[in-house]
Image (cartoon, helix red, strand yellow):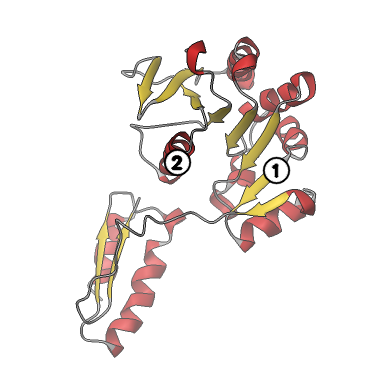
Amino acid sequence: MDTTKSPRVLMIIGLYHPIVGGAEKICQALSKSLYQRGVPVAVLTQRRRGLPECEVIDAIPVHRKMKWWHPFGIAYMLSVLLFLVRYRREYEIIQCFGLFLFVPAAMLMRYLFKKKVVLRLMCSGPYGDFANIEDLTFKDLIMAGARHADRIIYMSSDMREELLQHRFAEEKLTCIPNGVDTERYVPAAAPGTHVCFVGRLEAQKGPGYLIRAFSLLARESGMAKLLMVGEGRQKPLLEDLSRH
C-alpha cells in the first residue's frame, strides 16, 4: 500500500471491479465519489485468478489480499486481519459491504485500535445477507461483531425489519438507498411507457414479477415497451412468459 497517500477510508468487499454486480458498482461509485471529494480511500477484496494482487483503478488503490479458499473460514479471516493490522496506520474508517467473514476482523480493529466500522447490507430476504451466512461455521461470531458496528446502512424497509429482528440497535441504523446518476440516465422524451431491466435473470431479481406486472400495463397502453438485458438460469422461462 502506498504510504505517501495513506487512505483514511478502507472499503472491504468480496468482489470488486472488473467483476460487475450491484454491490461492486456501488462500492466503486462510492470510492470514486470520496476520492473526488479529497477523501483518501482504498479497497480490500478477494484474490482473483488472472487479476493483479495490487493495482490502481480510477486513482484508487485496490488490494486483492483476501484468500477465497478457506477451511471453515479461518484462512479467509486471518488474511483480512493480517492486512488490517499491517496497514492500521493508513485508515481510520472501515466500511464492510455485506455480512461475511471479514466482519469479525474489522470489529477487532475497532476495539484494539479504535477504528470506526460501517456495515452496509447488500440484500434482504431468502437471498440476503442474513440468509447467506446461515451455513457458515462462524455465523454467530459474524453476527455478534456486526451488532457492534458504529453504523449500519440499509436500503429498504425489508432490510430494516430484518435488522431489528436480529437485535440490531435501532439508533445505529441509517437508510441510504442506491443512487442513480441522473446526468447519465435521463427519461426519454418519446411518448409512452418504456422500461428497461438490466441484471441477472435469476429468481433473486424477480424478473418474472416484472413481466407479469408489465403485461397489465401494456393492456392499458399500446405504447408500452419492456426491454430486458441480461443472462441467467431463468432466461428460457422468461422468454416463454413474455410470449403469453
Residue name at image x 61 percent, y 22 percent: 91
Q: Is residue 186 left or right of residue 175?
A: left
Q: Nearer the viewer, residue 14 or 237?
A: 14
Q: Is residue 138 visible?
A: no
Q: Position of residue 132 (x, y in %)?
A: 59, 41
* Residue highlighted by disc 1: 151
Residue name at image x 35 percent, y 27 percent: 57
The label on residue 113 is none
How dense is the environment of label 1, judged by Cα within 10 Å: few (below 14), some, or many (20 and up)?
A: some
Q: Nearer the viewer, residue 27 or 147?
A: 27
Q: Residue 28 appears in which quarter of the rendering?
A: top left
Determine the residue located farthest toward the bottom in the rendered image: 220
Q: Is residue 117 left or right of residue 70?
A: right
* Residue highlighted by disc 2: 33
Report the number of numbered marks.
2
Q: Residue 73 appears in which quarter of the rendering?
A: top right
Whether residue 120 is situated above or below residue 85 in the rendered picture: below
Whether residue 17 is situated above or below residue 223 in the rendered picture: above
How dense is the environment of label 2, judged by Cα within 10 Å: few (below 14), some, or many (20 and up)?
A: few
Q: Position of residue 96 (x, y in %)?
A: 59, 34
